[in-house]
Amino acid sequence: MNIIKDEPLNSPLKSVILRLGGFHLEMSFVGGIGHLMEGSGITELLETVYAPNAVTHMTSGKAIARAVRAHFLIDTALTSIILSHIYGIPLPDEIENETGTNDINPANYINTESTDINAEDLSDELHEADAMLDELLKGDISVEKACDNVLIDQIKSRIDNFRESHKSFRTSQLWFQYMDMIDILRRFIKAERTGNWELHLQTVKDMLPYLAASGHNLYVKSSRVYLQQMENLKTTHPEVLAFLQSGHHVIRRSDKFWAGLSSDLVIEQVLMRSLKTTGGMTRGRGMSEGQRAQ
């Protein structure tokens, strides 16, 4: 960036537009999540599934694929706990402790006294949600139609009310913040995979406070400058902005909807892989150290 800035006005480098690598930004953000949640018990939780050495790399953001899957599993578990309180449905392990068997159906153990929701409304919502899930899995309805269903808004509203009623509890606030960070991560991955430029910029903006809080100052500075430059594209390079808005800020190896890849991820998978594997520059047999240095 400094090189381009210091170039004379007539330099061809002035037309170059730099972008922040989405893959490495994602790694930094996941590392920030691990730093902010340090001491919360999340490490011990992950070690029930993964080896301790693997957890170290996951919480630092290095083992990114494992880390993303693990965080999504934890977020799903937390959401299940919240919904179990909202709808008065005991968790499977609670039922197992009472019955001594794994062959259980939580729907048969609904406790309407533990929730403020009208029993009839509760039953209708659960049956409607179950029917919509079946239709979605069978392909009878699209994901967009399912997301636009008013039932989803009702469930979100109940979750928001639950969070509001528990905002005075510090432990609850910690894990609510964790769920918010995972939601940002999920939306960022969606933006990269689907080529959604506006969602990409919004999620990068949402990451800034957490990157700053976790001490990732270089990414905070770079992300802020990046957002400012991308915002100025509408006046400096409108044709480039149109190109990015059409989904070309990611690279695709196929025409599938969920096939977008960050440019720096493709560089790692293709260019750097060819250089660092057997036969490449760093492990080549036909080049000496001096030749590789040149």
Image (cartoon, rainbow, N blue to C red):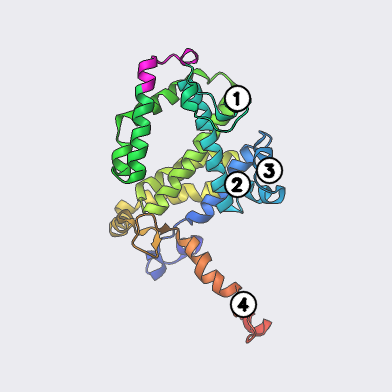
Q: Which residue is mark 4?
A: 278
Q: CA distance from mark 1 to mark 2?
A: 41 Å
Q: Residue furthest right?
A: 52
Q: Are marks 1 and 2 in contact (CB under 8 Å)?
A: no
Single out the mark in the foreground, 1 or 4: 1
Residue 44 circle label: none
Which quarter of the rendered picture does the C terminus lie within? bottom right
At 47% from the left edge and 39% from the top edge, which residue is drawn?
183
Single out the mark in the foreground, 4 or 3: 3
* Secondary structure at numbered mark 3: loop
Q: Are marks 1 and 4 in contact (CB under 8 Å)?
A: no
Q: Are marks 1 and 3 in contact (CB under 8 Å)?
A: no
Magenta-colored stretch includes residue 2: no
Q: Which residue is mark 1?
A: 99
Q: CA distance from mark 4 to mark 2?
A: 30 Å
Q: Which residue is mark 2?
A: 31
* Secondary structure at numbered mark 2: helix
- Which mark sits nearer the N-terminus, 1 or 2? 2
What range is drawn magenta here?
A: 112-123
Image location of residue 160, percent across then percent down: 44, 25
140 over 237 or under it: above or below: above
Q: Are marks 4 and 2 in contact (CB under 8 Å)?
A: no
Q: CA distance from mark 4 to mark 3?
A: 34 Å
Indicate the amino acid at tag 4: Thr
Residue 47 circle label: 3
**In-front residue for pair 8/15:** 15
Q: Residue furthest bottom?
A: 286
